[in-house]
Image (tube, coloured by chain):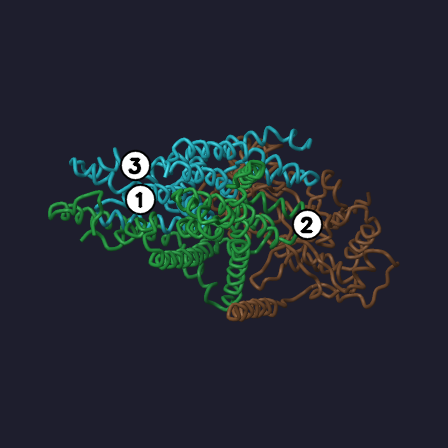
Amino acid sequence: MKAFITRRKSLLVAAGAALALSLSACGGGTTTTPPVDKPSFAAGTTMEKLSQAGKITIGTKFDQPLFGQKGLDGKPVGFDVEIGKAIAAKLGITPDKIEWVETVSANREPFIEQGRVDIVVATYTINDARKQKVSFAGPYYEAGQALLVNKDDSSITKPEDVAGKKVCSVTGSTPAKTIVDKYAAELVPAANYTACLEPLRNKQVVAVTTDNVILAGYVDKEPDAFKLASDQTFTKEPYGIGLKKEDTVFRNWINDQLEAFAKDDTYKKAWEATAGKVIKTVPALPTIDRY
Amino acid sequence: MDAIFESLPQYWDGFLRTLFLAVVSGVIALLLGTLLAAMRVSPVAALRGFSTFYVEVARNTPLTIIFFFSAIVLPRLGVKFEQFEVAAIIALSSYTAAFVAEAVRSGVNSVPVGQAEAARSIGMTFAQVLGFIVLPQALRTVVPPLINIMIALVKNSSVAGAFFVLELFGYGLQLSNSRGDAVMWILIGVAFFYLLITVPLGLLAHFVERKVAIAR
Amino acid sequence: MTSVLYDVPGPKARRISLIGSVLGSIIITGGVVGAIVILSSQGIFNASRWEVFVNESAKDVWTQLGLGVLATLQAAGVAAIIAFPLGVALCLLRISLISWIRVPTQVVLEFLRGMPVVLMILFVLLVFATSPFVAVVSGLVLYNAAIFAEILRAGIQSLPKGQREAGLAIGLRSFQSRMSIEFPQAIRRMLPSLVAQLVVLLKDTSLGYIVAYEELLRKVKLISDLEPSLLFSAFFVGAAIYILINLSVSRLAIWIERRGTKKAAGGTAKAVETVDLELGTAGPK
């Protein structure tokens, strides 16, 4: 029994060491403005609670290129992550005090409702069904769905062209649903976008569909193999910041910060450091939806 | 609750595809597995070796990785399917066959030695002993575990949802994404459709078990 | 020792079998070589796809994979330790002589067995608001306890009736007979199935992806997402690690089983199994 305990301990130590290793390995350049020194908030607000605690838990995607993707050093990077850092900074919280939690489509609403995360910045499209469970600040970005096709394929230029044809997207994602419901494509679901590229390369599907920014990333990596079917997007996906339902004060505060980011270049810098590497034009902050 | 009824067409489509994958893969796995089991007890050393190797590797590889090979590596080798269901069926049946082979083999071992000896003593060949005497008796003990393997197969088919085939679980994920307000109900709906296949199979297993029970 | 299923092959049969084996090996080897040639012609074995495992970022890659392995083993270990006693308990209830205990247990077992594990994991997370780790472990425990219970039940029912009768005859109560006479024999007898299920449990940790539990396969996927060209290398390495772990578990099990067989003189079903295993490696003499 004693031997067992020792072994277990050493295992835990090893785990701890490995974790420390992965944490120390990171540190890459951050674009976020330095945290506000001792911000003050009205008593009882979520802002006050978080800023007093000095830490925040943010849910994001770990597998969404350019927006929220976990790097080899174990830290997520992307536009969503930068927005999250900027908001934390306004609460006086430094990036190292942010706990990043991976949110996948099935657990976003539950995590917010249970308080497992304070906010969710995770390519989270604002829609009415979700508004029944959680509140949204923003939108802070408006993406649009597009099609990625083989370089030599000129038969597809608009979404109507894929009707009845096979199109790959990630299982359970919003773009996957849209391409079926609106454009009658035959959906070929995959675990991730990288996996989707394979059948496209093999011409087993005619296109891969998701938000334009992500697809632009693949064109950027393999310009000889792929291209966007068109520069036009065919949906509007307003990305919002998810938080507890009815926490209107917190939501309004985040909305104010987003508008401030647009004015003081925080927004522009966050974009340029991440998604801007692929899409050069910095988007304008969409009109905030203060519902 | 409404979410379930509104989504019935999707559930139904997914259910049929899951059923299709399970039935076709199940039949192929049964045939392939029995063949592997026969190879495992055959006189030819190479066949025994191959069967052992195959079963060991297939049983110890996660299904997701087998799917990766059938759906992504095979097309790279020039084997391209018009229908992605083919890749799913290859993965599911080659994985399940290993488990079938193990079940059949232990069934063969459970047949009293005297049976084979008697058959041999009246001059039957290996194929005859196996085909007429041992396998039919082995089947009695093998049917319940085989049904359990089939139950596992039905549930395993959900992995296909991540490899280009839209089946029940894939629909479940899609619905739960678009209906964030009713995730719970959506999933209960998915569970219901799986149980619709697996529970009757389980009951069948118990029934067969009682029917063929050997008094000891 | 020879198998009872066939004669010891004569010289002619041995020759045919040898030729067949050589031909078969040539065909299989040819297929594998062909596949490697085709894949490498598409650049899948190009250094650029693999250098990430050895260059300056290798430390990070292997750290991530190591953390994944650790997470996989942790979830599987904890789940197995909880699921086994629970399986014994469920089995006891399932073979209870009292019908109002037995029948509801059977219904519960049937339900647990028929539910996809991935759904159970998700349910636990959503309903009980747990962390991903707890959700994964709970899902695995619920399902595998049910399977363990079924395996043990089959083991107990395969015991000769005399075992229990003898136990009762010397004045043991039903529960005592179960615990001290029947279960020990059933566990030993069903060890191969129990261990096979353990491997399944280990592999099923990969279903944790649904609640974003970062086990090995999830790590493989995240790495492959970073760069499309890493797709193949990450999966090949992941497959190798998995097979290595699972084979070790299986080998360990066979070793334990052999040891157990020696101890339990005259174990019935097991003895036959061992003979067969030995034949499989040694071949007819």
> Do marks 2 and 1 share a subunit?
no
Q: Do we see residue A172 in this rendering?
A: yes
Q: Chain of mark 2?
A: C
* Chain C rendering hue: green
The residue labelled by disc 3 is: B135
Q: Would you place residue A91 above or below residue B113 in this image?
A: below
Q: Chain of mark 3?
A: B
The residue labelled by disc 2 is: C129
> Do marks 1 and 3 share a subunit?
yes
Disc 1 residue crowd, few under 14, some 14–19, many 20+, Cα 10 Å: many
Disc 2 residue crowd, few under 14, some 14–19, many 20+, Cα 10 Å: some
The residue labelled by disc 1 is: B109
Secondary structure beneath dot 1 equals: helix
Q: How many marks?
A: 3
Q: Nearer the viewer, residue B74 or B116?
A: B116
User: Mark 1, mark 3: which one is toward the viewer?
Assistant: 1
Secondary structure beneath dot 2 equals: loop
Q: Do we see residue B169 in this rendering?
A: no
